[in-house]
Image: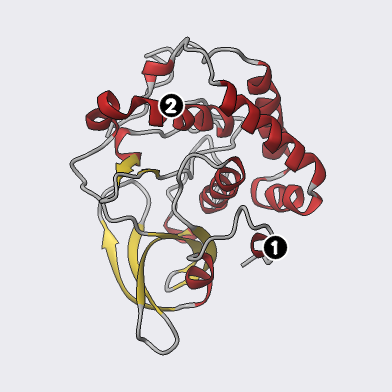
Amino acid sequence: MIKYLYENERIFSEYLEKLDNWKTGNIRSVLDGSNQVFLLELSCPNFNDSLLCVYKPMIGEKPLFDFPSESLYKREMSSFVISRILGWPNIPSTTIRNGPLGIGTLQKFIDHDSNKNYFTLRDSCLKNFECFALFDLLVNNSDRKASSCIKDSKNKIWSLDHGLTFNENSRLRTVMFEFSGMKISDQLKNDLMKLKDNLNNEIKLRDLLVNWLSQNSFDFFIERLDFLIELDRYPYLDVNLNVPWPLL
């Protein structure tokens, strides 16, 4: 794993070293989704503890016309890093490493009720989702389905599936139409400005993202960041252009 992640306390989490270094064990396929996804068990060196993670190998990525081949795992990793610097949304600890099927992302598995998603949670938790909506605008998320929003047993809401992000050749696709035209919260705008300062001042972080995304994708991301800092309200979305498929 890139050592920089451990040097930046905002990015570091207790699970990163486990995801990076624990031994891989039992693996089983998760059938939902167009790309190959696996549940992978990790074990500590003395085998007295284990951790379940979601493994998305590069070779399991389905070719897409609007995304470069073999790049989705890097975009997933970039989303995690940006979320940790912003402080939102909650994305499970994620790393890039070699697994049983080669290089890809390993992300801590979050135990949750699969019957709960954005559509079932939005009425009671809509305020919690504002940062999801703004984050999706920032990283140009092309695949915000309802099922990529989950709630764990401690009532913490998590954001999943960020492989289709940071691409100048795709468009925002989301189920979160409730925020169209709403004012953007001042605190979230302040967090965006802090992110900009962070990217301006930390060369290693900037180089890391360019390495994962390409210079063009990174430049596009910075343009979106600047645009959102100046924006007062969420843009109005078009049901003919901005809806993912399937919705779940």
- Sequence order check: which comes first, mark 1 or mark 2? 1
Residue at the image point whose x is 50% and y is 36% from the top: 65
Task: Give the tally of numbered discs.
Answer: 2
Q: Which residue is mark 2?
A: 173
Image coordinates for residue 54, horizontal then vertical, percent: 37, 60
Q: Nearer the viewer, residue 204 or 9?
A: 9
Residue extending furthest bottom?
Answer: 46
Dot 2: element: loop
Identify the mark at residue 185; answer none if there is no mark: none
Q: CA distance from mark 1 to mark 2?
A: 34 Å
195 left or right, relative to 166: right
Q: Nearer the viewer, residue 189 or 94?
A: 189
Colour pattern of the rendering: secondary structure
Residue at the image point whose x is 26% and y is 31% from the top: 121
Dot 1: element: helix
Q: Which residue is mark 1?
A: 7
Residue type marked 2: Arg
